[in-house]
Amino acid sequence: MAKARSAPDVWMIVSIALILTIGLVMVYSASAVLAFHEFGDKFYYVKRQLIFAVLGIGALLFTMNANYLIWKNWAKAALLICFVLLIIVLIPGIGVVRGGARSWLGISSFGIQPSEFMKLAMILFLAKWLSEKQQTITHFTKGLLPPLGLVGLAFGLIMLQPDLGSGAVMVGAALILIFASGARIGHLAMLGSTGLLGLIALVIAEPYRMKRITGFLDPWADPLGTGYQIIQSLYAIGPGGLVGLGLGMSRQKFSYLPEPQTDFIFSIVSEELGFIGGSALIILFMILVWRGIRTAISAPDTFGSLLAVGITGIIGVQVLINIGVVIGAMPVTGITLPLISYGGSSLTLLLTALGILLNISRYSR
């Protein structure tokens, strides 16, 4: 590997900095009322988010300056550790239940979500695996089934928590990476059909998932139950209009929209900053994804290219699902908006991953 020929991608750095800054401001704005009501401190959530932002920035600076090829050596160990954590979190008394899912490890309000770290570990391992065995990827049994079987195993453990949102992001990003490595569309389409049937079975197996689907199709059929979040989200977005009600002036955060600082924070962004503010945030994400794709195309080796595709896929899929849920275009899945929503594990992981992406951009051809 030759020495870095350039500084990290400036467009990417600026978009990350702006999105993160908007996120910190909006976490405070969205959570101040709830934090004061629950803890007597309106800065409760934003102080914790700031702590994880500082940790995440430190991780970003480290990974941005560490040659990305070192992660190839650690990919297998990282994946194994994440599998162990996914098993440990399922043990009663060890795994912490929050929001109906046993997906946390930690003490009190501080904890980590192993499923969040599995996203990056899976991408690292698949990038290593497929870069070394790219010649076999067009072969169904030898090339495609092994990595998909690994993804399926991780998805199964995540669904035992259950955490459909994190599992969906991991699977989506992994499929994008596998497709970029040269897998045949016909093979992926066949497996996609099988996966769709499996997803339908998962929905039918759990009544609460079925209720989410019916709540998505007709939220007004149960406005105080399964349709409540979507309806309150739309009540926030609608009054925002073109320019919004003004920063800090949201009405829905006054105990109408549940947990406005996490999954539905984009509703508050749209209510306070309007169509212009929401669109500006989406444009920043589009710039980030564009520069990620550009980095993947210009990476000097297959591992770097696939790793860049996978990291960009995590960001893109997560943004697509979160905003799709918020505007009522997708069923509620419980997933955060990258770099914006409150959540230490997600924020730290994403900044670490983006640091790796920035490092790859330093070696662009």
Image (cartoon, grey):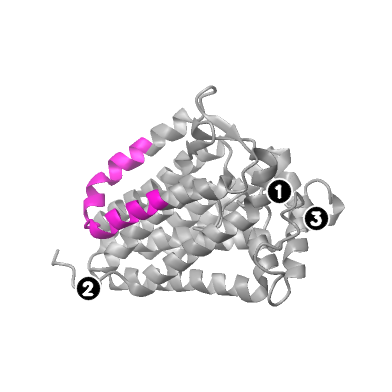
Q: Tell me the CA gap for discs 1 and 3.
A: 16 Å
What residue is drawn where x is 48% and y is 46%?
Answer: 344
Q: Between residue 312 and residue 277, name the one nearer to us.
A: 277
172 horizontally vs 240: left or right? left
**Closer to the camera, 62 or 329?**
62
Mark 3–mark 2 distance (CA, rounded to whole Å): 51 Å
Q: Going from the N terminus, do you reach mark 1 or mark 3 first?
A: 3
Find residue 193 and report its image quarter: bottom right
Horizontal and vertical percent for residue 319? 54, 62
The Cα atoms of the two marked residues, 1 and 2, are separated by: 45 Å
The residue indicated by pointer 3 is 219
- Please tell me which of labels 3 and 2 falls first in the chain: 2
The image quadrant where one finds the N terminus is bottom left
Which amino acid type is marked by label 3? Pro
Q: Please give the range of residues in magenta.
A: 54-81
Q: Is residue 203 magenta?
A: no
Q: Where in the figure is residue 142, as x and y percent of width and height?
A: 33, 50
Q: Is residue 62 left or right of residue 311?
A: left
Q: Which residue is mark 1?
A: 258
Residue 318 visible (yes or no): no
